[in-house]
Amino acid sequence: DGRKEVNNPAKSASEASKAALPPQPLGIGLRQAMGTSSFWLLVGSYFVCGLTAHMLSVHFVPAAIGAGYAPLKAATAGGLMGGASIVGIWASGFISDFTGRKIPLASLYLLRGVGLIMLMYSFNNTTLYLSAIMIGFGTLGTASLTAGMVADFYGVASMGTILGTVSMGHQIAGGISVYLAGMIAHESGNYHWVFLPSVFFLFAAFLACLFLREQRPHPTEATTPATSPLK
């Protein structure tokens, strides 16, 4: 009809703002995640994490004192365990950004189990301190790596719900283990039957993590949860 289209500044500004918005978060919901084996492997391994981490944070020092170490030596070892966890959570997260998260996560459970064995058969200050460092290094890093794997596998759209569900088992296990460990140690007079099953649980968590089907994309490739293994 010969009429020229008049530019609409408001419309142009709206289109420009939409273009500047970040892409919407991608991912799947909790129900879909629960239909995958990876979800249950993460739930199971993180349950073991809570079972052993909470128990050791409360009972490590009493166990060392009960094994004959002076309270100051036992407390020093407990402090080393806490300090090593700071290094462990950063180092494992940093390494996982380059190697993938499965092997570092599995290694932390293995390291915690080996450290617990060393604690059970500790015979001097050196072995006590070394066991504390190994346990500490292998403890908190599982939190960041588990969260990272939830994001890698299922995206971030429902990450809070999925990770919260995974973490719920961690906290339930922690509460139960602290009480049971105290009861067993009180009845038996030592921590042998507390630590021995914990070692087996940690080795089971190590194996469970090895069954996670992680796929590392090329760093320059854009990735979405659709490329993640959900089996």
Image (cartoon, helix red, strand yellow):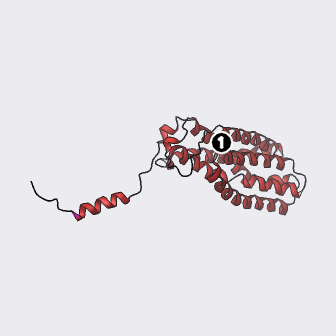
- Residue where numbered disc 1 is placed: 45
Q: Which residue is farthest right?
A: 123
Residue 62 picture quarter: bottom right
Q: Is residue 61 or residue 116 the one in the foreground?
A: 116
Does residue 82 sit above or below 216 in this rendering?
below
Residue 10 picture quarter: bottom left
Q: Position of residue 35 (x, y in %)?
A: 52, 34
Q: Position of residue 8 (x, y in %)?
A: 21, 62
Residue 184 picture quarter: top right
Q: Main secondary structure of the magenta part?
A: loop
Q: Position of residue 130 (x, y in %)?
A: 82, 55
Does residue 28 sit above or below 67 in this rendering?
above
Q: Is residue 25 magenta?
A: no
Q: Is residue 1 or residue 50 the one in the foreground?
A: 1
Q: In screen coordinates, is 126 left or right of 213?
A: right
Q: What stretch of residues is rendered in magenta?
A: 3-8
Q: Is residue 104 or residue 223 the one in the foreground?
A: 223
Q: Which residue is farthest bottom?
A: 9
Q: Residue at x 60, y 44 (%)?
A: 169
Q: Is residue 124 or residue 207 the one in the foreground?
A: 207
Q: Position of residue 13 (x, y in %)?
A: 28, 63
* Image quarter of the C terminus: top right
Element carrying mark 1: helix
Q: Amino acid at mark 1?
A: Ser
Q: Which residue is farthest front?
A: 2
